[in-house]
Amino acid sequence: MRRPSARAYTLIELLIVVLVLGIAAALIVPSMGGTGSLRVQAAVRTIVADLTETQSDALAFQKGRAIVFDTEHNSYSIVDVNSSELDVENDLIRRTTIHGAEFGDARIESVEFDEEFTLVFDEMGSPVQEPMGSDPAANGTIVVSGSGQEFTITIEAYTGRVTVARTGG
């Protein structure tokens, strides 16, 4: 009567497994170091999404909307436009703060909309110079940086088209 032989792994099989795991680790480890840059890009995408949502909201509700930026606190507020003066506290729709590890410690470096920190959309979704106004705004920019990268978000005059360009890093 024959005894079944015990099956074991050969040295070749073990070396192949170690080699495959080594290759997998070599591919994964460098990409894990780049998560900070991906998080900064997430901050830029969040800002762009809020810009386009605010513009769409203005058009959908046929009512002015504004985004008021606060670079000191690295945040912005989306507000209803109910008069020629913005009341951020009483007409607040939503406030967003770009902070911490979630956004790779991204910073809103600068904001420029006709020398103001406020982007106003009229009821047709077009950027205008002031709340309840009809004069078109000039091109505006928002600069976001972090993890050795810098991005410039541009909002075009008349159309409000939003574009993003990597300007540093």
Image: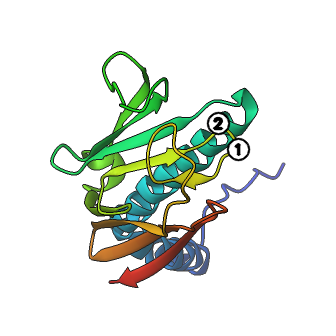
Q: Which residue is mark 2?
A: 58
* Percent position of residue 23, x then y: 52, 79
Report the residue at 66% width, 55% height from top: 6
* Percent position of residue 65, x then y: 53, 35
In the rendered image, the residue lying farthest to the top is 90
Looking at the rendering, which quadrant does residue 33 occupy?
Answer: bottom left
Q: Which residue is mark 1?
A: 124
Looking at the rendering, which quadrant does residue 55 occupy?
Answer: top right
Looking at the rendering, which quadrant does residue 107 occupy?
Answer: bottom left
Report the residue at 29% width, 42% height from top: 75
Report the residue at 34% width, 45% height from top: 102
Which sits in the foreground, 23 or 135? 135
Which sits in the foreground, 37 or 15? 37
| Quarter of the figure with the C terminus | bottom left
Which sits in the foreground, 24 or 116? 116
In the rendered image, the residue lying farthest to the right is 1
Which sits in the foreground, 36 or 123? 123
Q: Confirm or deny contact between disc 2 and disc 1 (CB under 8 A).
A: yes
Type of amino acid under label 2:
Ala
Type of amino acid under label 1:
Met
Few, some or many C-alpha atoms within 10 Å of disc 1 (few <14, some 14-19, many ≥20)?
some
Q: Nearest to the eye among marks 2 and 1: give it.
A: 1
SS under mark 2: helix
* Percent position of residue 113, x then y: 38, 60
